[in-house]
Image (spheres, rainbow, N blue to C red):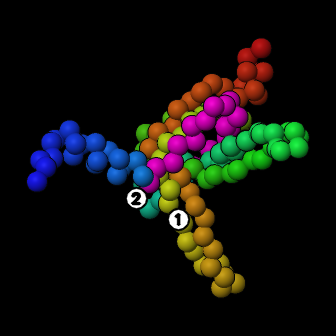
């Protein structure tokens, strides 16, 4: 029977942790922007929260040689100090990198229909620069 070393166990535990994470890492991080200013969330617990939409633009060339563009939208939720920083330093158009876990939010509408939305619960939000509107204000 093979002996499992500590480093082997560490490797597998790290692999298991990364299975349910989302990283919007790409070759073109400048094409990942906030779709709106972050909005504060004030739950009953009193912990500061922030919610914002993230636009991930993908550009490719199809089989016919035509340039194609598609935008996917994600809702990102951050809590605590991370939320404070997002509310303070980010605005619509800010380029960011988000690392987090998927979370499905389910609710029932007043009319009785069930709804759900996949959100990203942010573990890290890396600020990649300023939005074009922020740069224009300083000029």
* Between 3 and 75, the one nearer to me in the picture: 3
* Between 118 and 130, the one nearer to me in the picture: 118
Q: Tell me the mark number nearer the camera, choosing from 2 and 1.
A: 1
Whether residue 24 appears in magenta in the rendering, the answer is yes
Looking at the rendered structure, the number of numbered marks drawn on it comes to: 2
| Residue that sits furthest to the front in the current view | 1
Check disc 1 and report the residue beneath it.
104
Q: Secondary structure at mark 2?
A: loop
The relative height of residue 27 versus residue 57 in the rendered view (above or below) is above
* Between 99 and 13, the one nearer to me in the picture: 13
Q: Crowding near pointer 2: few (<14 within 10 Å), some, many (20+)?
A: few
The C terminus lies in quadrant: top right
Residue 137 in percent (x, y) is at 76, 21
Q: Quadrant of residue 63?
A: top right
Residue 107 in percent (x, y) is at 57, 74
Q: Quadrant of residue 94?
A: top right
Q: Determine which of the numbered discs, if any, sits on residue 9 in the image.
A: none
Residue 94 visible in rendering: no
Whether residue 125 appears in magenta in the rendering, the answer is no
The region drawn magenta spans 20-40
Q: Residue at x 70, y 50 (%)?
A: 72
The N terminus lies in quadrant: bottom left
**Viewed as shown, does residue 128 lie left or right of 92?**
left
Q: Earlier in the sequence, mark 2 or mark 1?
A: 2
Residue 113 visible in rendering: yes
Check disc 2 and report the residue beneath it.
45
């Amino acid at each position: 029977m093979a002996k499992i070393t500590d480093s082997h166990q560490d490797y597998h535990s790290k692999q298991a942790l990364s299975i349910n994470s989302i990283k919007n890492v790409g070759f073109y991080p400048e094409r990942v922007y906030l779709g709106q200013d972050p909005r504060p969330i004030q739950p009953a617990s009193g912990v500061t929260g922030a919610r914002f939409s993230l636009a991930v633009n993908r550009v490719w060339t199809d089989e016919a040689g035509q340039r194609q563009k598609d935008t996917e939208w994600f809702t990102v939720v951050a809590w605590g100090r991370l939320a404070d920083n997002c509310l303070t330093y980010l605005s619509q158009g800010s380029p960011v990198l988000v690392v987090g876990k998927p979370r499905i939010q389910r609710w029932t509408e007043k009319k009785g229909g069930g709804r759900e939305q996949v959100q990203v619960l942010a573990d890290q939000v890396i600020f990649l620069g300023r939005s074009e509107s922020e740069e224009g204000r300083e000029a």
